[in-house]
Amino acid sequence: MTKFTFNRRRFMSTTAMTGAALASPVYLRSASAAGGEVNIWTYNDFVPKSFKKQFEAETGIKVNIRLVDDQGKQFNLLAAEAPNPTVDIMTVAGHRFLQFIDNELLAPLDTDRLSNWGNINPTFSESDWATINGHKWGAPILSGMEILAYNTELVSQEEAMTWNTLFSEKYSGQTAYIIQDMMSIVMLMLGYDGNMVAYMDNPDKAAAIVEEAKQFLISKKSLVRKYYDSGAEVQQMFVNQDIALGHSWNGPAAALINDGFPLGMTIPNEGSYGFVYTYNVANNAPNADNAYTFLNAILASPEIGASMTKASGFISTYKDASNYLTDLEKQSTSFPEEQIANLQFFRAEANKMKYGLVDPAVEAVKAA
Amino acid sequence: MSHDDSPRKNHNDIVQYSATRPFWGRLTNWQPYRLLLTFATASPRRQFIILAAFPLLWLLTQHLGPMIQMARVSLLESYPVAQGAPQNFTLDNYIRFFGDHIFWMPFFRTLTFAAVFTFCTLILTYPVAYFLARHVSRHNQMLMLLILLIPFWVGEIVRTYAIMILLGNTGAVNLALKWLGLIERPIPFMYTSFSMGLGIVYLTALYMLLPLYSALEKLPKSYTEVAADLGAGAWTRFRRVTLPLTIEGISSGCTLVFLISTGFYATPVLLGGPSTTVFAETIAGFFHYAGDEWPTGAAFAVIMFAAALFITGLFQKLMKALRRGDTK
Amino acid sequence: MNRSNRIVLACVYWAFVLYVFVPLILMILMGFKDSKFIGFPIRSWTLDWYYSIFSDAEILYTFGYSMLIAILSTLISVIIGTWLALLLEGRKFWGWAVTFGLMVLPALVPGIISAIAFRIYARWLGIEPGMGAIIWAHAVHNVPFVSLVVMARLSTLPKSQTEAARDLGADPLVAFLRITLPYLVPSILGASIFCMLLSFDDFVRSFFLGGYEETLPVLIFAMLRSGMSPEINAIATIALVLTAAIGIWAERFTRRTNKESQL
């Protein structure tokens, strides 16, 4: 097995192809050459191009990809199409499941139909957030987390080990964060449960906590350069040196590191949250069988996972995917054990209450 | 240009055309065509109905239809309506706006910004349009106007990122200033109302430039020449002749720019700072983060739109009054 | 006095040109940067982004697809917009103001609102998302711009001209085709260019009404998720060169037709 992998890697590097799928027709043996099509909504590069090509050639199933750029838009589109969607597979973040499930937009995932389900690292496939109402709802593909990114020429790693640096006078006007995400982190900083699952029976306490976090962010508003929304924005702010440090998702930060930018990232001591992108089958999907064929195929090899990581900067959920990364890529997609220990996943259970409180708080911070 | 010529010459043109181009003569003499025409022009009323029927149908189904659907959603308790569940109508979505002051701030900020940016755009583009319409030979006007319009053909997002690398701490402006030795530390231009304004004027200039240009172009040169002959100075000529005669262009340009700027989303989000949140962001928030809040988002959109219409209505009234006062 | 005025105004004009062109030049420059992110400093240059675009059939296809949508939607907008202008300009009838209001409505509705309204309405009408739906939404959105421009031009048409034609026995349709329409051509052409660029540049409507083939702005938005790469600048530059070429061709064309009509 090891030898096989070694050869495969040699092959990959000599052909200089990032497309992992090139070399793995094995995954298709069980699939019948059924033809037809499968419709997918996903982010750019989440379905590696060469994989797509090969999948189409081997199965005769045409892969139609509709590129999306955020979770909310997928929900809106799907809501507008329900109950008879055109889509088979969507890309939903694990902690957003509940909203889709409540609106009957997702079908439970029948993992027995996926012989390659075992290729997923159980940290992700068997995690607590993954099972809702006794069902699995998606196949984890990439994992992201809220991290503190810093320009290593301006900020020391020591300073970056605490979220407090983000609010320090020293870096006044040189910081940026996404307020929605920061609300959860601030709750964690203040010693509360940012998922708010602990306060589900105590809405008054929950409201008080959100209020405290809100007041905290308002009091620090004069120190922040920018409340941003997208990964591209924070990357650009780092490149332009408009900021010295900022909260970010690991994907965009990793992309900067891989491009040679002097950037570091940490999971600070107070802890942080992670989330997982999953492929999901739509409720009433028009080509459900093809959707399962596709899912099983894309889970077939760790090389496919690695190529998704190369493109997105997020961490692969596949077992052994990191074997196929360069050293720099490995470095930009891994954290020391002691930092990982501080990480927990976002949870969906309390989302309705949480976002009922957090969304207006975010508006209030912006309006303050 | 032929259209500026006297009607007399055109008389001759027409006579000539009918003689030299047989197609039109044949068409007008073709029996079915004549019948159709007699039917269509039997009475002014029928003529009008034939002219109006299709466009009116289009307006009602295509222009009004989507907005009515939107308004309907703004009155719903929830959307999308779950299968089998009854549709309940409510005013709560509207009441929510008036009940919570955190929404007022971005709302009024948007109206203020829109007014300020409209004014800035007007001040900036009027001389440009004036120069084009009055001081450039007709031959070159279109080309020079086109030169101005070319940059607007780059997508909003790409252009906005270009502004970021222009104004950023290591952006072109700061690099140039540093190179000239004027500054030592970069000036933080980005993420302020300045950077936002710079980006927005980019978006609005086009909508202002075109109406201004067409209004100024219409203005016969002889008017100002006469005024000059009568001894009026440049400023007086401008104030008493040019400005009043182009007020229609100003008014339509400002109306268009104001209404459009209340809806800007991407540019303020990307170029603005923590204290420049606009109402479009608030509205978009209801569509983005919490998908089940469409009705509230729709209601807020209706409120924004109604307010913007109200203000432009007032503005139009004012302009009309000004015009009347001037012609008296 | 007049001369110094002129010089000042010329300076203002060129300053304005500078203002609109500097970001553009930066954008074009960044398309040649050898890095995955735009911005200064530029350490080395490359043509790779252009190579990769021209060897990517999907991106080239997207160009064509966006162009086709722009052209078809513009055709519809021009016909209906001109028709509306003829109905509204210089006529007084009951409900004129309401009709005018309805005419300009799509131009005034903020982008995201209009996109969602179209999406809801399309679903209600049973229109499938895809090319047809995008063309439809772009056409509706652009009608007001055509109408406004054509109305402005129409209002400067001396009444005497059409009246003279009528006196000479031309029926309304012939008078329209022979006198009014040729007079309107420059404004119609100008409006078409404007519509095409609005359509080519539109993201929200294309996104909400699109199917599995993306238009250029939708592709750019999706690419933006993995960072503002010079490749996006390169794509935008190519689009710019294309549209500018069309614009300049159109300008030449109107100039020629103007000259012909002068002869």
Image (cartoon, coloured by chain):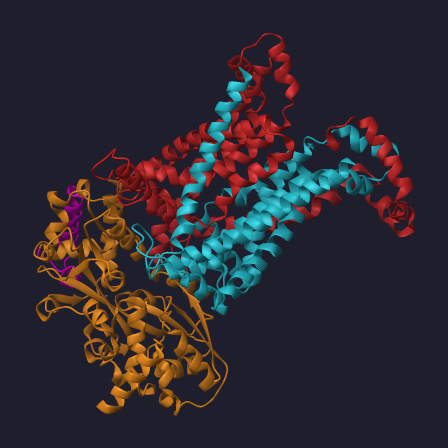
Span of residues in magenta: A191-220
Based on the displayed image, in which of its 4 quarters is residue B193 positioned?
top left
Residue B314 in sight here? no
Relative placement, left or right, of C114 versus C87 is left
Q: Is residue A213 magenta?
A: yes
Residue B151 in sight here? yes
Which tint is chain B?
red
Q: Nearer the viewer, residue B136 or A285?
A: B136
Residue visible at 80% across and 27% down? B7
Which tint is chain A?
orange
Q: Nearer the viewer, residue C174 or C247?
A: C247
Q: Nearer the viewer, residue A181 or C235?
A: C235
- In the picture, the quarter occupied by the N terminus of chain A is bottom left
Residue visible at 50% across and 33% down? B255
Q: Is residue C19 magenta?
A: no
Which tint is chain C?
cyan
Q: Main secondary structure of the magenta part?
A: helix
Relative placement, left or right, of C17 versus C83 is left
Image spot of residue B140 (x, y percent): 61, 35
